[in-house]
Structure formats: structure tokens, C-alpha cells
Amino acid sequence: MKELDIEKVKHLNEYCQTVPFSVVKEELYSAKELYYGYDPDDEETFNTCYDSLVYKHFIENGKVASDVQESLARTLHDFGINKAMDRFLQKHDSRKCIGIMGGHAKARTDETYRNIVFISKKLTEHGFVMISGGGPGAMEATHLGAWMAGRRKKDVEDALKMLSVAPTFRDQGWLQTAFKVIEKYPQKKYVSLGIPTWLYGHEPSTPFATHIAKFFENSKREDIILTVAYGGIIYTPGSAGTIQEVFQDAVQNHYLSFGFSSPMIFLGEQFWTVEMPVYHLLKYLVKTGKYQNLNMTVTDKDEDIIDTLVKFRDTLSGMH
């Protein structure tokens, strides 16, 4: 190695020791690690916890880093997270992973939020591993359901009541109430995977996810969610981001990118056939031959979702 190259490596190493995040990341984050320094009894500590300090650094150095050393530090971090996630998925079997997509603004008091919680709870109890973008709204509901798996309905209702005092992530107490629920209903039996990003760092990551793969690079994160959820994707009412994910998933299924077509389940018949008639469009594209291999369901019933995903899992298991 040339002397100049050695000097560059030395400077990179020195720079990596100054950033507020772990450049060499060998394990996924836990909520405890991501929110290190946060005290639920003192909301002000959120501003100085690990996650907030990394986000502040991220913004100060540019969402797209212009500095080579900063760019390399982020890349090394994301590489480590990616490898740690691969190990997680090898352990928990991608065929049993279910993704839930939907709006980050969905309030905890919204009926759809509640529906997602109970659907996720039931799927987790059926042996599935729930995956989401790891943020608030529909994403949080996914992980709350997984966290409350195995508990009584009245316990879930109590948790929802505790959370309702801070309906959205913009309300004071959003994070505090989540940690209060975790404290009241601790568990170590069930796992779920949240995949958030510091690009949307103004949206706090849900601590209900037992494993958190937080990336700097959002494009990598979006692709991963749709790729690793071999067991199927549930689409809940959302806006532009959710619609993008629908068609990105449709492309993978059309080309059988992974050797099979996973279920695409649209939760909310009124929304997906009238308000945002994506389901009808995809059905038309299949009928006219523009798309193939799409395994789609639109429903308002939890039972339909559970049955569809369990049957597909059993079929997929028989293929391997």
C-alpha cells in the first residue's frame, strides 16, 4: 500500500472515531440502544439520546454527504446493519416474514391503527415475524401488535388507552407512553423487525420493534422491506409512499424475482377500490396481460388475511 493511501486510511479511521454513531455495527439496534440516554420521565432527554444525536449529525453533514469520510462512515454503518439483518433473517426464516405498509401519520386513536394491531398480534401468534418501516402510525401499530402477542384482548385495549393520550408522533408524550406500555407489559418471547431511516429522522422509531435495522440510506431500506417479506405484504391505507411500494412489490411478483409471487393484501376495501382504486387498476393490468403472477386480495376481514397468509406459508414450505 502506498504511503499516501496509508495516510488516507489513517485519517478515515480518526474521522470514524469522532462521529456519534457506531461505524462498525455487528448487531441490530434494540430500542434500549437506539434511545440510550432517554428517560421516559424526562422528555427533554430525547434531544440528547443516541438516536437524536445521530440525526442531528446527519442533518448537519447533509442528507447526501458531500464529505468523502462522512459518506464512507455511513456506508460502513449501513453495511454492518445489513449483515446483521441477514443473520436475523437466517435465524427467523424469510418465508415467515410479513410486511405491513401504511401511513406514518395514522393516529393511535384511528380504527385502522387498532385493526393493524390485532392483525399483527394474530399473525405473530401464528408464528410469523412482522416487519415494517419501524416508524410511527401504521408501522408502530405493526410492532405493538407483535409486542402484545399472547396477551388478552383487554391488555391490548389497555395499552391502546395508554397510548391514546399522545395520538401522533407530533404530540408530546408519544415516545414516553410507548415506553410506559413496554414497562407495564414486558415480554421476551416474540420478535419483530423495524427498518427505519435517519432520512426521516423527524419521525421517531417505534420502541415496540424488538430488532431495529436503522439505515442512513433510505433507498436501501425501502427495497429491503419489500424484498425480505417473502411471506407477503399487507397494504393499509396510506399516501404516495405506500402507493410507490405497491407497484415496486408488483414488479417483483410479476417477474417472480425470488422464484414465486407473494401475497399482496389490501386492507380496506373502500380505500383501495374507491378512494385510491389501485386494486382495480392492478386487476385490469393483469386481465390485459400487462402484469402477471399477482396474488392479490382486498378485504376488511382479519380472518381473510390470516387464512391467506397461513395457506401461502404452508404452500411455500412445501416448495422447499
Image (cartoon, grey):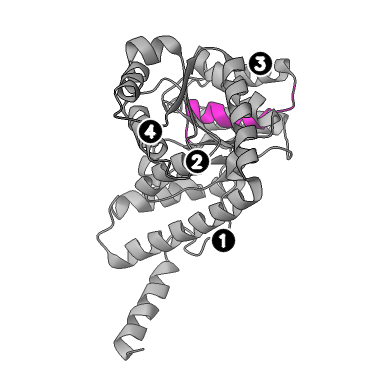
Is 72 contained in the magenta span? no
Badge 4 amino acid: Ala
Residue 313, quarter of picture: top right
Nearest the eye: 149 or 270: 270
Q: Residue 80: horizontal and vertical position, in percent?
A: 50, 60
Q: If you read the primary sequence from the N terminus, does the residue marked by circle 3 or circle 2 appear first?
A: 2
Q: Residue 272: horizontal and vertical position, in percent?
A: 39, 16
For label 4, the residue is: 250
Mark 4 vs mark 2, CA separation in Å:
39 Å
Nearest the eye: 179 or 157: 157
Q: Is 112 situated above or below 214?
A: above
Which mark's residue is nearer the viewer, 3 or 4?
4
For label 3, the residue is: 157
Numbered range of the magenta stretch: 135-151
Mark 4 vs mark 1, CA separation in Å:
33 Å
Question: Dot 2 lies on which element?
Answer: helix
Q: If you read the primary sequence from the N terminus, does the residue marked by circle 4 or circle 1 appear first?
A: 1
Q: Is 185 situated above or below 75?
A: above
Q: Is any atom of residue 307 visible in this view?
A: yes
Image mark for residue 26: 1
Mark 3 vs mark 4, CA separation in Å:
35 Å
Nearest the eye: 132 or 209: 132
Q: Residue 123: horizontal and vertical position, in percent?
A: 64, 28
Which mark's residue is nearer the viewer, 1 or 2?
1
Question: Dot 3 lies on which element?
Answer: helix
Q: Is 31 situated above or below 138?
A: below
Mark 1 vs mark 3, CA separation in Å:
37 Å
Q: If you read the primary sequence from the N terminus, does the residue marked by circle 1 or circle 3 appear first?
A: 1
For label 2, the residue is: 46
Which mark's residue is nearer the viewer, 3 or 2?
3
